[in-house]
Image (cartoon, rainbow, N blue to C red):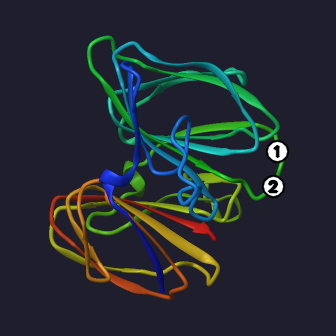
Amino acid sequence: MKKILYPAHTRGSADYGWLKANYSFSFANYFDPKRLQFGALRVLNDDTIAPGMGFGKHPHDNMEIVTIPLSGGVLHEDSMGNRGTIMPGEIQVMSAGSGVTHSEFNASHDQPLKLFQIWLFPDRQNVAPRYDQKTIASLLKPNTLSPIVVPRDVAQEDQLWVHQNTYFYWGDFDQDTNHTLSPSGSTQGIYLMVVQGSVIIDGETLNKRDAVGLWDFSSLEISIKADTKILALEVPM
């Protein structure tokens, strides 16, 4: 098994006043040649956006973009004609494909917005841009990692999907739990972030916002403490 630890305090960071950002990988003014990506995972930004503020209209292409609100609402508008608010418990997926412009703002004028924004390299270029947004409560099972975003080829009607052989898993654990990580294939890796709480992986204790990248393994048992939330991303390496 191969492993890279990503302690929370080693992430890149920026404070723009209206935006406080933590960068798991090189982004904007933060550059680390050792942190360009993890397999097909290019960006995992942990953002706090001030009330009423946000990102004005800007373009993207050939990237799969997933937004996970943690608290507060994301006001989204794009060149495909979509406009709405994404709330905690919902996830937004946007395939930029051949090109799209969008804006994202904090929908509240008095409370900060906290979110993860995740970018993946797609498995095909210049697809037609697309947008989807779903509530994921029905997909979540207690005390396990539940798939919330899946590859296009295996998606069921009620599932969010991306143009990549990628699985997003979310876990809410209210009791101590042992869980086995098993990637779906030998060329897949798993990037796991502790959203809150504590996890023991291969003898290493990970706490809030610590992460680890794992590949070249078939299965691994991890120990998860009660009151823990986990985001795990399985991606091609």
Q: Residues within 10 Å of mark 1 (few under 14, many from 20)?
A: some
Q: Given the image, on which type of amino acid does mark 1 rest?
A: Val
> Which type of secondary structure does the marked residue at label 2 adopt?
loop
Q: Is residue 141 visible?
A: yes
Amino acid at circle 2: Arg
Mark 2 vs 1: CB contact within 8 A? yes
Q: Quadrant of residue 211?
A: bottom left
Q: Tell me residue 74's x, y (percent).
A: 44, 26
Q: Nearer the viewer, residue 44 or 78?
A: 44
Task: Give the vertical position of 90 relative to 113 (above or below).
Answer: below
Q: Residue at x 15, y 65 (%)?
A: 226
**Residue 153 at what x, y percent from top left?**
71, 63
| Mark 1, secondary structure of its residue | loop
- What residue is at 76 percent from the left and 59 percent from the top? 123
The quarter of the rendered structure image containing the C terminus is bottom right
Vertical relation: 203 (above or below) 165: below
Q: Which mark is residue 127?
A: 1
Q: Which of the pair 202/126 is nearer the observer?
A: 202
Residue toward you, 45 or 181: 45
Mark 2 burial class by Cα count in 10 Å: few <14, some 14-19, many 20+: few
Position of residue 70 measured from the top left corner of the image (x, y, whole percent): 34, 39
